[in-house]
Each structure stands twice: as C-alpha cells, then as structure tokens.
Image (cartoon, rainbow, N blue to C red):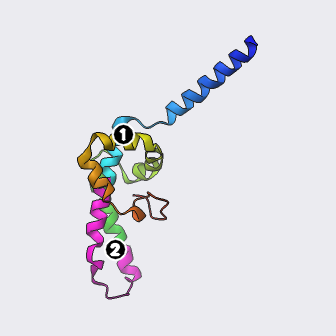
Amino acid sequence: MNMWNRVLTISLGVVLCVGVAHAAEPAEVAQFVKARIEIGEMMTNYFKGGSGYGEGQRPSQEQMRQMGTDINAKLTALLAKHDLTLDDYRKRSPEVFADDAAVKQYLSEHPDLKQRYEALPLDRMGRGGSTGRGY
C-alpha cells in the first residue's frame, strides 16, 4: 500500500508539473490577446469593401502576391509593438489560445478588450473551429 501511495504521488506530481509547464503566463496571454485584437481589426479594415476587384472577380496571382507582402509587412510592424515576430506569433499563438481559461480570465478583467475581441470575425481568427489562418 505504501508503494502505491508513492507511485500515485509521483505520478500526480508529474502530471501537475506538465500542466503548469504548458499553461500560458498571464503576461503572455495579455500580449497575445492584444496582438490578436489588433491583427483582427487591421485585417477587417484591410479587406473592407472588397478592394474593388469587381463583383465575383478574384484578384490576379500578382495582386495576391502583392497583398501577401503588404499584409506580412503590416503584421510585422504591428507585432513589433508587442515585442513579437511574425514567426513567434504564428508558432506560439495556438498554444497560448489553447489555454481557454486563461484567455477568458484575462478578457473578464478587461471588458474593453473583451468587447473588441468578441467583435472579431470568428471564421478568420482561429476561433470556433475555423479553417482560417488563425491570426
């Protein structure tokens, strides 16, 4: 019985340590939530009005490349304000936003940010089972 108690205690300790190691830090949650809000607002404004490609008309490949370059430049500048790079944001954001409890806690403490966050389009912000890029 004593052996089982030790095994159980050690196993529980390992599970708790792993859970704590993967939990997002409050400062990191704040950093990523603010960045996601600004990215969402920037992308919404960027595509507002359909950029005049005509009704049902898609942009050309060249226009798509130019848009991609422009968007990445704008994202890089925006993320720099939050001490992040585009690669860091893309790599870490799925982990940070996977901690739904931490994100909800942060947003509940900041009603102004919560309102802006909830106004973002769900299908493009990596929320709600989206197939979007997950900015």
| Residue closer to the observer: 37 or 82 | 37
Q: Residue at image x 43%, y 49%?
A: 93
State yes or no: residue 48 in magenta: yes
Q: Amino acid at mark 1?
A: Gln
Labelled disc at residue 66 = 2
Q: Amino acid at mark 2?
A: Gln
Labelled disc at residue 97 = none
| Residue closer to the observer: 86 or 50 | 50
State yes or no: residue 4 in magenta: no
Instruction: Give neighbour class at mark 2: few <14, some 14-19, many 20+ (Cα, 10 Å).
Output: few
Instruction: Give neighbour class at mark 1: few <14, some 14-19, many 20+ (Cα, 10 Å).
Output: few
Image quadrant where one finds the C terminus: bottom left
Image quadrant where one finds the N terminus: top right
Q: Residue furthest left?
A: 112
| Residue closer to the observer: 135 or 19 | 19
The residue under label 1 is: 105
Q: Residue at image x 65%, y 24%?
A: 11
Where residue 90 appears, as percent x and y from the top left, is: 43, 53
Position of 54 with respect to 9 (left or right) is left
What kind of element bears circle 2? helix
Q: How many marks?
A: 2
Tell me: residue 114, above or below residue 28.
Answer: below
What kind of element bears circle 1? helix
Segment colored magenta: 37-65
Tell me: residue 100, above or below residue 61.
Answer: above
Tell me: residue 13, above or below residue 100.
Answer: above
Tell me: residue 2, above or below residue 110.
Answer: above
Position of 3 with respect to 38 (left or right) is right
- Which image quarter: residue 101? top left
Q: Main secondary structure of the magenta part?
A: helix
Q: Residue at image x 36%, y 35%?
A: 26
| Residue closer to the observer: 98 or 87 | 98
